Amino acid sequence: MNICSIRGAITIEENTKENIIKNAEILLNEIIEKNGINKEDIINIIFSATKDITKAYPAIATRNMGITDCAIMCMQEMDIEFSLPMCIRVMITVNLDIKKQDIKHIYLKGAKKLRPDIALKNTGFAVAIDGPAGSGKSTVSKIICKELNFIYVDTGAMFRTITLYCLQNDIDCNNKDEVTKELKNINISLDFENGIQQIYLNNENVTDKIRTQEIAKNASIIAQIPSVREKLLNMQRKIAKDSNVIMDGRDIGTNVLPNANVKIYLDADIDERAKRRCEELSLKNEKFEYDKVRQGIIDRDNADKNREIVPLKKADNAITINTTNLSIYEVSDYIIKIIKENIK
Ligand code: DC
């Protein structure tokens, strides 16, 4: 015997006996079908329902489906603040020859919001996060990706990597032709460890090496070169096509992923952004002067916002969040809420 437990949930439209039974049947049938279960092999079924479901036990659905010889139980859900209304959950224990990682848990209708990581698997769901340096993009993107099992694509790192190559090889970042000629020698590849991006320059992992102030400064110059942007655009779009992503940068909502499911524009006051950058530098034991860090950010903002080619700009349909007085968890929870609201 190989015993396994399979989970699922569905929301119902109205608190009527008919609707409760109909939806419980939809849920059970989907679990049975997607996991190739024989009804005779079901050992037990535990249902739970939110407090607002009062007209029937979902378990009646099992009788209608001819599942009669297993233990069945219905319970009331805990009433948690912000919990999803009108929701039926189920856990089926079954004798099934299947590997744990191949089990398909099923979340339907409004219940998809409970497990976006499962409901959105392989659907190419894209979240675009744009904003100026230090607005909190990468910190919150990483938190959200862990929670939702998305991959985090840091496009700034790609521009930084090309910059690193130029600095290492004495190529003038201001010389468009020289940089363009070198692009064929620059191979950038990405790898995702637990959803977090590692970036390689000609097979060398440069994820940490690109985090210097000199590279940041020159990256905003490199980012103005059309051939550089074109090379990276193709990579960025391909990654988003294949996976669920949170992609952060300057032109994601406006240019890279104009059809992203969710677009966010993060911003924060300049002093707050400078303070955050200084905290990062001091954690890395790097020397810095507050005024220089602050001015560096202002200069990069100007370069990114005023360049001719896809400047940093809020997409028309992006939601702006000013993070000046918010903690990283307040921002990430808010974005997760927006993502859940956009799950169809
Ligand atoms: O986010 P960051 O500091 O790592 O980005 C480095 C530079 O790259 C930034 O000054 C602007 C540029 N960039 C861009 O032009 N477009 C993007 N999508 C991401 C970054």
Image (cartoon, helix red, strand yellow):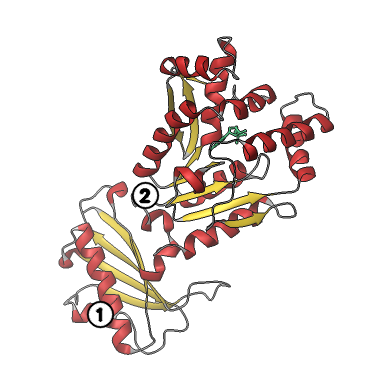
Residue 287 shown left or right of residue 258 in the figure: right
The spot of residue 162 in percent (x, y) is 52, 22
Quarter of the image for residue 280 reads: top right
Q: Is residue 154 above or below residue 34?
A: above
Q: Is residue 229 left or right of residue 74?
A: right
Residue under the point 46% across and 40% down:
195
Q: Secondary structure at mark 2?
A: loop
Work out whether residue 308 or residue 328 is closer to the camera in this orientation and state it.
308
Residue 50 pos. (x, y %):
45, 78
Q: Look at the numbered disc 1 and say if its residue's Cβ is closer than 8 Å to ligand 1.
A: no
Q: Quadrant holding ligand 1?
A: top right
Q: Which residue is mark 1?
A: 61
Task: Please provide percent x and percent y for residue 170.
Answer: 58, 9
Looking at this view, is 312 or 244 the one in front?
A: 312
Residue on which the image places disc 2 = 124
Q: In the rendered view, would you say 286 is above or below 237?
A: above
Q: Nearer the viewer, residue 216 or 284?
A: 216
Which one is in front in this view, the residue at disc 1 or the one at disc 2? 2
Packing grade of label 2 (10 A; few <14, some 14-19, many >=20) is: some
Q: The N terminus is located in which quarter?
A: bottom left
Q: Residue furthest top?
A: 170
Residue plotted at (59% across, 19% down): 173
